[in-house]
Amino acid sequence: MPNAKVLSEKQAIVAELTEKIQKASAGVLVDYKGITVEEDTALRRECRENGVDYAVVKNTLLRFAFNNTGLNELDDLLNGTTSLALCEEDVVAPARVMSDYAKKLNDKFEIKGGFMDGKPVSLETIQSLASIPALPVLRAQFLGTMLAPITGLAVVLKQIAEKGGEPVAVAAEEAAPAAE
């Protein structure tokens, strides 16, 4: 039987894990066996840059945290070496970062499973999420789409100004006889 100090430390870790999992919009479980210190350092740097909280976690402690959050279905994945990648704001970030590393490191790094919005998701869902661009890229694409009509209008107004401020109807009438 562990002493009271060790038990209270483990309970604190489980409570912290439970809170992180509850706050996370998505999480991915990974088997990281065999990665080097350099590879792990690079992975952790990329996780920080993408707002992903990444940590190696004992399976037993993670099992307790999953049971506290209703993610009991993920218990079967908790064997071997396990790390957990979580993100509060971006549901895509953990899947994208972990999937990129799984591709780079082949057999050393394998995605076990994950969850999104408090529900387990399949590996196919994780792979689909991983193919979605990062949130800043999506925002830029969306803004580009929104600004396209305004940009087109600016081009037309610039052309009108270059023709001496003639109204569009006059410019269109001048172009029509030339076409005949």
Image (cartoon, rainbow, N blue to C red):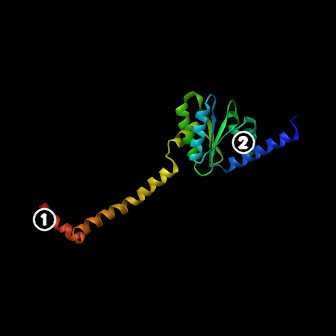
- Answer with mark 1 or mark 2, whichever residue precedes in sequence: 2
Q: Which of 66 and 144 lies nearest the eye of the viewer?
A: 144
Q: Image quadrant for the C terminus?
A: bottom left
**Residue 2: % across, % down:** 86, 36
Q: Which of 178 and 2 lies nearest the eye of the viewer?
A: 2
Q: Residues within 10 Å of mark 2 (few under 14, many from 20)?
A: many
**Residue 158: % across, % down:** 28, 65
The reply to whether the C-beta atoms of the residues labelled 1 and 2 are less than 8 Å apart is no
User: Which amino acid type corresponds to the residue marked 1 in the rendered image?
Assistant: Pro
Q: Secondary structure at mark 2?
A: helix
Residue furthest to the front: 38
Q: Residue at x 29, y 67 (%)?
A: 157
Q: Is residue 24 visible?
A: yes
Q: Vertical placement of 125 versus 135: above or below?
A: above
User: Which amino acid type corresponds to the residue marked 2 in the rendered image?
Assistant: Phe
**Residue 18: % across, % down:** 73, 46
**Residue 22: % across, % down:** 69, 49
Q: Residues within 10 Å of mark 1 (few under 14, many from 20)?
A: few
Q: Which numbered disc covers residue 177?
A: 1
Report the side of 132 relative to 59 (left or right). left
Q: Residue at x 33, y 64 (%)?
A: 154
Q: Secondary structure at mark 1?
A: helix
Q: Residue at x 66, y 47 (%)?
A: 118
Report the side of 14 relative to 133 (left or right). right
Q: Which residue is mark 2?
A: 66
